Image (cartoon, grey):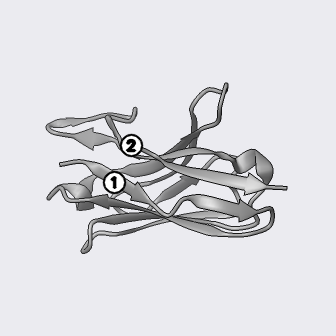
Amino acid sequence: VQLVESGGGLVQAGGSLRLSCADSRSIFSTSPMGWSRQAPGKQRELVATIGAEGRTYYADSAKGRFSISRDNVMGKLYLQMNSLKPEDTAMYYCVTYCWGSVCSDQPQKWGQGTQVTVSS
């Protein structure tokens, strides 16, 4: 069982990408999920989260440009990214706040990441 991201790539500034995360766990629908990113030489940054009930949170850097969503039937988490900027270049990770029997306000499991590169 793991989190598998896809959808990253190279895009020009102003373009869009849609990231996906496949989560095969039976508890996906009740697990708060999120997207985090890490640029070279920088600390990991939380981008957006979505609760089991659909409540969302966005970092200031993502507000108005990114949209997080989930499909509990398919076990998929999404991040729609519009108006991309070069500073959005990073490895993007799918995270879950529940793993096994543990739920926390800190991420409990990370995917392997998908690279997003935005050219100017």
Q: Nearer the viewer, residue 54 or 97?
A: 97
Q: Is 93 situated left or right of 39 in this image?
A: left
The residue tagged with tag 2: helix, strand or loop?
loop
Quarter occupied by residue 95: top left
Q: Nearer the viewer, residue 26 or 23?
A: 23
Residue 41 in the image: state x and y as whole percent. Answer: 67, 25
26 over 88 or under it: above or below: below
**Residue 112 location, quadrant:** top left
The residue that label 2 is drawn on is: 112
Q: Identify residue type, mark 1.
A: Val
Residue type for callout 2: Gln
Q: Are marks 2 and 1 in contact (CB under 8 Å)?
A: yes
- Please indicate, yes or no, whether residue 23 appears anywhere in the rendered image: yes
In this orientation, does residue 64 appear?
no
Q: What residue is pinned by disc 1?
A: 4
- The one of 55 and 82 positioned closer to us in this rendering: 82
Q: Position of residue 70 (x, y in %)?
A: 39, 67
Q: Marks 2 and 1, Cα distance to the nearest angstrom? A: 7 Å
Residue neighbourhood size for the residue with mark 2, other residues' Cα within 10 Å, grouped as few (<14), some (14–19), many (≥20): some
Q: Residue at x 76, y 45 (%)?
A: 87
Residue 81 is drawn in which quadrant? bottom right
The percent position of residue 37, horizontal first and vertical second, equals 56, 42
Q: Position of residue 40 (x, y in %)?
A: 65, 31
**Does 75 sit left or right of 94 as displayed?**
left
